[in-house]
Amino acid sequence: MGKETLTITDNRTGKTYEVPIEHGAIRGMDLRQIKVSEDDFGLMSYDPAFMNTASCKSTITFIDGEKGILQYRGYPIEQLAERSTFLETAFLILHGELPTRAQLDEWTYHITHHTMIHENIKKFMDGFHYDAHPMGILVGTVGALSTFYPDAKNIMDPANREKQIYRLIAKMPTMAAFAYRHSLGMPYAYPDNDLTFAGNFLNMLFKMTEMKYKPNPVLERALDVLFILHADHEQNCSANAMRSVGSSHVDPYSAVAAATAALYGPLHGGANEAVLRMLREIGSKDKVPEFVKKVKAREALLMGFGHRVYKSYDPRAKVIKNLAYQIFQERGTNPLLEIAIELERIALQDEFFVKRKLYPNVDYYTGMIYEAMGFPVEVFPVLFAIGRTPGWIAQWQEMLLDSEQKIARPRQLYVGSGKRDYVPIEQRR
Ligand code: CMC
């Protein structure tokens, strides 16, 4: 193997430069030395949507999109989904190692005892209109938390950061459940510290007049697994928002509000709902070939298929497909499942999809599962946000402690007009 460097010849000047290659990348700043004259700014790279730009070094999540591999801190997602819990996985993502029994007990204790929200936050949520989308309420309310915890500004104090981490992971489900109950005009159900993380969330969503809510253990475990599967996904749109906003050294509640807002968009956290709509539109198994024809004619997208990074089966979709069978056994089959399976079967054999490496992604089966579990569609992105919170905070903390990071501030290629003089309004056409 040759030297770990790249030699660049600038054909404008004939000059040659040698830049180091590290971890399969060159540093963008190494291009700046490439100039046509002394007063030239230097060469930049142009990469809208970060298609081929690494914005950080990270030790949190590894994805191999070609092979369909997803690992948190080196542990395969399949093993975590089968053997871990969401809180244990959250500890792993944030601390880098699986906890000992004592560490897990302490961690669980702290998260469990930070689930309550201030009564004024409840009043604040009351101010939202009766039909406000739960995700919109969540964006606003998590941002508002920063005014309740002004100490959160001390982001460089590790003990202080740890306290905000407990609060964020613990309070996201409370705010999410309250947002949902608000949209139904139902009284809020307070957290129950005797229950697990997922069990308590179900309690806050669905408790009616019973003295003690007893979560269905199959649904409780399924929800916990779904949270594990969503816990981090390296530099996706919302993680990038978290890092970028956090790089201004704002408090973590404000940065999580930004990440939640990024997740709200239909290109990110909203695809599972679109899959449900698509399957309903197809209507029956025998209409699947007709729909596939439409997709191939570019008249429709096969929602829940394809991914920017995964070019083989999304490993999360595999786990979710198995989970779907367990849930349908418990709650009765979702009639859309038959159509989904047929659509997947036909698409995976069709040259159009094979050639483009289009496989089911995480959203293909989640919508059907959530529906079978009794969640209305508006709650789907909120579920995603609860699961993703440890990932966002881990990305934020890694960014803060990385001596190579600074305030995020991309460059631009200015292509607007040159300098011109102000024209009085009477002289404008
Ligand atoms: N149905 C039909 N054709 C598709 C689809 C699809 N779902 N996805 C991609 N293609 C085609 C695309 O038109 C392109 O064709 P051609 O090369 O002939 O122009 C080719 O496949 C390659 O796609 P791409 O443009 O490289 O894909 P991308 O990386 O820009 O977009 C995507 C990725 C997820 C936005 C896209 O696959 C898509 O729109 N999928 C449906 C929506 C969806 O399921 N989103 C959930 C993403 S996973 C959740 C998350 O992490 O947020």
Image (tube, helix red, strand yellow):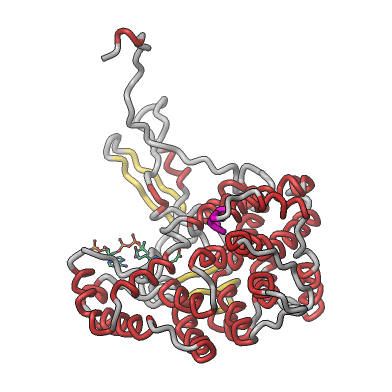
Q: Is residue 415 above or below residue 345?
A: above
Coordinates of residue 19 in the picture (x, y in percent): 44, 49
Does residue 331 appear left or right of residue 124 in this picture?
A: left
Coordinates of residue 259 in the picture (x, y in percent): 56, 54
Q: Is residue 40 above or below residue 157?
A: above
**Is residue 394 visible from the viewing direction of this image?**
no
Q: Is residue 95 above or below residue 349?
A: above
**Is residue 78 visible from the viewing direction of this image?**
yes
Q: Quadrant of ligand 1?
A: bottom left
Q: Residue at x 58, y 46 (%)?
A: 245
Q: Residue at x 39, y 72 (%)?
A: 276
Quick one: quadrant of the N terminus? bottom left
Residue 150 is one of the magenta-drawn residues? no
Residue 135 is one of the magenta-drawn residues? yes
Q: Residue at x 62, y 53 (%)?
A: 256
Q: Which residues are magenta?
A: 131-136
